[in-house]
Image: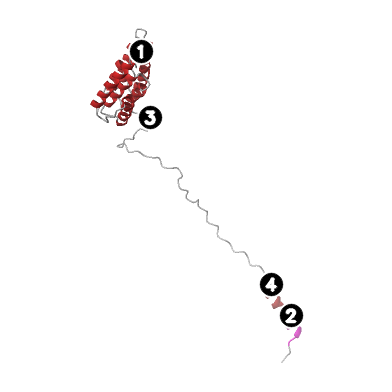
Amino acid sequence: MSRRNPRLLASSIAVVAAAGFVWYFWPAAPRSQPAPAPRTALHQPDQTPPKPTVSPSVAVAPNPATTGSLTAPKKETEPAIDSILRDTSLDNIGAARALGGLVQDSSLSLDARAEALAHMLNLSVNNETSLLLPLVQSRDLPDSLASTILSDALNGPLTWQADACLAVMARTTGKELRTQASEHLVFLTGEDHGDDINGWTLAVRNTRAKWDAAGQ
């Protein structure tokens, strides 16, 4: 049996080892990667707010802030206060009577009637009983205007104060106004008859006689 050449065997082992080394460390060919799928845009919700719809069968009420008041305007003063005051054919009494017609006109606004009364008070000096007393006795005169006349009367002659208070006591409205009148009658006569209009009438008559005697 022949012996193998030891150099040949060693050479073969070296070749095999080198081939294994090369195979182990040689980089593998890159694998083909599949193309990425195209990205689709995310769905964006519609940001436009929906338009309000109004049913044709539903009536939309008008907005008073934009359309103004729907209430018909009050009747204007006829004749106007200015025209009465500028009418040279009227004396103070005539102008006061004309203004008194406006004061009693319930179709006018309360402001217009109050303005007419303010001018009337200035023109009725020394004629209060004949010009203003019918107003206080009228049922068409609001309590607020009757109060204006009474307050003005308390600065006038004593007889006019008493007449105005009696007229207020005869009214069926204005409890606070009647209380003011009765308290002033107590001051004028020194008597207290509460709500008794007949008792007050007699007390005022007796007191007026005293005033006349004293020249008041």
Q: Does 127 sit above or below residue 52?
A: above
Q: Label 3, on which residue?
A: 67
Extent of the magenta region: 4-13
Q: Taken as a whole, is the magenta stretch helix, strand or loop?
A: helix
The residue singled out by tag 1 in the image is: 84
Q: Position of residue 141 (x, y in %)?
A: 29, 23
Q: Earlier in the sequence, mark 1 or mark 3?
A: 3
Looking at the rendering, which quadrant does residue 78 occupy? top left
Q: What amino acid is labelled 2 in the image?
A: Ser
N-term-proximal mark, 3 vs 4: 4
The amino acid type found where label 4 is placed reads Val
Residue at 76% over, 83% down: 7
Residue 6, magenta (yes or no)? yes
Element carrying mark 2:
helix
> Separation of disc 2 and disc 1 at Cα?
146 Å
Q: CA distance from mark 1 to mark 3?
A: 35 Å
Provide residue 39's location: percent of width, then percent of height: 52, 53
Measured Cα–Cα span from mark 1 to mark 4: 129 Å
Residue 10 on the magenta segment: yes
Q: CA distance from mark 3 to mark 4?
A: 96 Å
Residue farthest top in this picture: 89
Q: Which residue is mark 2?
A: 11
Residue shown at the point (75%, 85%) measured from the top left: 6
Q: Which mark is residue 22?
A: 4
The single residue placed furthest to the bottom in the displayed view is 1
